[in-house]
Image: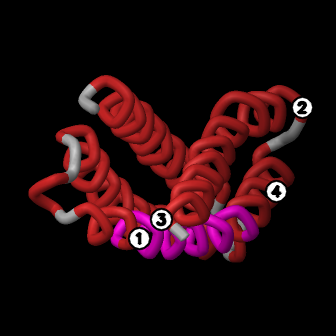
């Protein structure tokens, strides 16, 4: 069971961090280069709506699998890297909650209202917060590998 939880934990992290990477370094620059604001921001809001459903699922999976692995060895016996990952993972989840219920919600409202200036500003906030989460995820993974 432990190996399955570890595998699910890894898959969930790949989906979340890979999706952020795709959004920041492939979708956003390409859409910016090829589309005007109304089309680009409508696409961005729609893509993020779908992706964020997956993020909520990955968060649940990361929490469940992480708690299982931690409780199987005990917090006192867990390597230092696990504690780093737990701490940063919780920060990432809180940051995503802020991103989702704040800037992303406002992005969707601005798109519906055809307020492209506001939508662009909110899309920029989403990207900044997503980039922060990507960096935190990289640090968390590094901590697990380097602090075992």
> For the residues marked 4 and 3, what is the alpha-carbon distance in whole angstroms?
28 Å
| Pointer 2 or 1: first along the chain | 2
Element type at marker 2?
helix
Contact check, label 4 and label 3, Cβ < 8 Å: no
Taking the spot 82% from the left edge, 56% from the top edge, the residue there is 43
> Which quadrant of the figure has residue 81?
top left
Question: Pointer 1: what residue?
Answer: 63
Question: Pointer 2: what residue?
Answer: 34
Question: Pointer 4: what residue?
Answer: 43
Viewer-side label of 2, 1: 1
| Pointer 2 or 3: first along the chain | 2
Query: Is residue 76 toward the left or the right of residue 65 in the image?
Result: left
Element type at marker 1?
helix
Mark sitting on residue 51: none
**Where is residue 56 drawn, in percent x and y?**
56, 73
Crowding near the residue tagged with mark 4, few <14, some 14–19, many ≥20 C-alpha atoms within 10 Å: some
**Where is residue 105 drawn, in percent x and y?**
53, 73
Query: Is residue 19 toward the left or the right of residue 139 in the image?
Result: right
Mark sitting on residue 62: 3
> For the residues marked 2 and 3, what is the alpha-carbon distance in whole angstroms?
36 Å
Q: Is residue 72 magenta?
A: no
> For the residues marked 3 and 1, what is the alpha-carbon distance in whole angstroms?
4 Å
């Amino acid at each position: 069971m432990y190996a399955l939880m570890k595998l699910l934990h890894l898959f969930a992290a790949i989906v979340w961090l890979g999706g952020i990477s795709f959004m920041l370094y492939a979708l956003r620059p390409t859409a910016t280069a090829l589309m005007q604001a109304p089309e680009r921001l409508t696409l961005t809001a729609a893509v993020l709506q779908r992706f964020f459903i997956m993020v909520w699922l990955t968060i649940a999976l990361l929490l469940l699998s992480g708690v299982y692995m931690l409780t199987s060895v005990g917090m006192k016996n867990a390597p230092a890297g696990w504690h780093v990952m737990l701490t940063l993972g919780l920060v990432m989840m809180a940051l995503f909650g802020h991103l989702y219920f704040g800037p992303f919600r406002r992005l969707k409202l601005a798109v519906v209202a055809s307020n492209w200036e506001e939508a662009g500003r909110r899309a920029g906030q989403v990207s900044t917060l997503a980039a922060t989460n990507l960096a935190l995820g990289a640090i968390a993974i590094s901590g697990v590998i380097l602090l075992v």
